Every structure is written in C-alpha cells, then in structure tokens.
Image: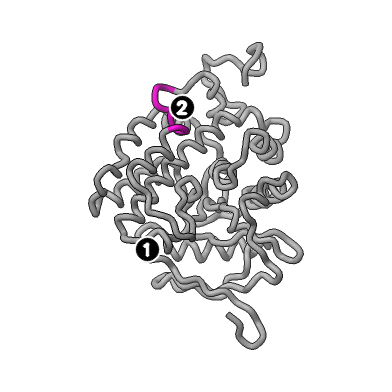
Amino acid sequence: MSVGGEAYVLRIAGAGTHRYIDRAAEARNAGLAASIGIAPQVLHLDPQRGLMLTRFIAGGAPLQAAELRRPELLRSAVGLLKRLHGSGLVFAGRMDLFPKLDEYIALAAQKGCPDGLDLRPLSRQAEAARAALEGTEMPFVPSHVDPVPHNFVHGSSALYLLDWEYAAMAEPMWDLAAVSIEAELDAALDRILLDEYFGSAGLRHAGRFALYKASLNLIAAAWAVVQIVDGNPARTLPPSPVSGWLGMRLRPRPPPTASTLRASVSDPIVIGLNGVPSWLRGARPAGRRQPDEPDPDNAGGGM
C-alpha cells in the first residue's frame, strides 16, 4: 500500500493463529530486529487482530529456495542469522524444540485429530532423539525460527528477514536446520552452512544438526495437523516453521493426509527410533562430553 508517496506493507494474520502466536512478543521481537538493521521498521502492530504495518523494502525481492542453494547467497543468509544470534538482543518468548511439539499435538487433540493424523505414537518413537538433544543444550540466542527462503528479502543494498511471528530465544541450531530443510540443501551445501557458521568446528556439530533437522520435520507435521483441525484450507495456510517438508506453501496443494504426513517424517526421524547411533554423539554441543566419554579428537577416527 502507498500513502503520501511512501510505500508500506500491511500484514493480516491468518485464522486461528492467536492460539499459538503471541502477537505482543512478535511486536517486540520484530522491533528489536529492525533496530539492528536486519528487518523492516515496524510502524504499528495490533496484537488483538494481528495487524502489522511495516515499511516496504525498496527494491526488495524474496529469495527462492534455488537461490539459497547458491553458495554465495547461502553464506550471506547464514551470516545474517549469525549476526542476529550474536547481537545480544533479548527476545520475548522461548522456543524449545520438543515442548513446542507437545504444544502443537495438544492443540490438535483439543478439537480431535482426524483419522490417521494423531502423531502422538510417532512422537513417542522419537524419545531417544529428544533425550539426546535435551541432555545438553547450546545457549539460547535471539532466533528467527522461520527462516524459509521467501522470508529472506534482498533489498537494494542489504539482505533482510521478514515475518517474525515465531521469533523467540532458541538454540541457534533451530534456524540453521530450518534453512537446510527449506532450501533443500544437499550434504555439500550443509557443510558450507556449518563451516560458515561454526568455522573449523563445523563438522563437530553435524550430529546435532542432523537430529534437529529430523525433529523439526516432526514439528512441521504437528503444525500442519493444527491447521487442518483449525479449518485452514491448504491454499490460504500461512507458512509454518518448516513448511517446505509438507508442501504447505502459499500455493494450491491438496491438504496433507495421514499417509503423506507419515511419509514426510518417517525417514528422517528413524535415526531417533531405537537409540541414537554412535555417529550422532555430535548431537551434544561441541566441546561438551559426558565424564566417561572419550574425546572424539583423540579417538582415532569418527566425528
């Protein structure tokens, strides 16, 4: 929209999103992100109705997944996230991986899950992954939580992030794993992502990164079930934290079914079904070991 020669963007919230999005927290976090130059200025936000008015990014164009698969743009996106994570900002809210999964499953259960879409049995199968990730945590930092490609906007002079609905304090691995999922990065590009963020220690974080990707996939499935029970049709669904795995974009697609949801989560999450394999000892943050665990740097191989 344009008023007096100035261009603005008016965001209208999706139906039912008040059940799981804190609009007051969104206003705070989007404003803080804008204060360090990585998001457009927030001019007004109505927490009750979910309306938000921001300045338009001149010359801005949202990135596509294929563009994030270009190493130079991937490094720029990771650099932007690293700048956010290291900013020292204190965001409202906290995004814990499995408690968020529990929340979405509970929200769906309140209205009754459709036949075949109760994810509680699959969630129980992921308990080994949960134990590995919750056993130790990386420090929580201000995080975007929904870094899908189209939320990165290339302006005339800089890269920006839009849509701070889910932003909160979170483990930085959430944003990194989500970028990999949404941009459909292959192993070589995942290595570029980890090396750009962690430097020479990138490989030591690969196990935790893999478990985060699998677990975010399960969260995406649970989020999609919430949309179904809320009556959000597929063509009008807002983007989820990791919507790409489910094909739940802002484009016409059939709603997910029990079989499509299970197919989307069963392969990646299998690494957590029967105990965490030894190669995933890197699921713990680099440099933190159990008292009886040998140092992987002196173990004669492996990660």
Give, as a single range, the part of the protein colored magenta: 267-275
Asked if 197 appears above or below 2 in the picture, the reply is above
Question: Residue 272 in the image: x percent, y percent?
Answer: 43, 28
231 sits left or right of 159 in the view: left
Asked if 22 appears above or below 81 in the picture, the reply is below
The chosen color scheme is one colour
In 3D space, how far apart are the residues under numbered discs 1 and 2 (Cα atoms)?
34 Å
Residue found at the far top of this picture? 300
> In the rendered structure, which amino acid carries the disc numbered 1?
His
Quadrant in which the N terminus is drawn: bottom right
Asked if 219 appears above or below 159 in the picture, the reply is above
> In the rendered structure, which amino acid carries the disc numbered 2?
Ile
Q: Residue at x 67, y 40 (%)?
A: 193
Question: Residue 161 in the image: x percent, y percent?
Answer: 62, 59
236 sits left or right of 201 in the view: left
Q: Residues within 10 Å of mark 2 (few under 14, many from 20)?
A: some
Residue found at the far bottom of this picture? 4
Q: Which residue is mark 2?
A: 271
Which sits in the foreground, 74 or 80?
74
Asked if 191 appears above or below 69 in the picture, the reply is above
Q: Which of pointers 1 and 2 indicates the residue nearer the eye?
A: 2
Question: Residue 84 in the image: x percent, y percent?
Answer: 63, 52
Q: Which mark is residue 18?
A: 1
Q: Residues within 10 Å of mark 1 (few under 14, many from 20)?
A: some
Q: Secondary structure at mark 2?
A: helix
Q: Residue at x 66, y 11 (%)?
A: 300
Image quadrant in which you'd find residue 180: top right
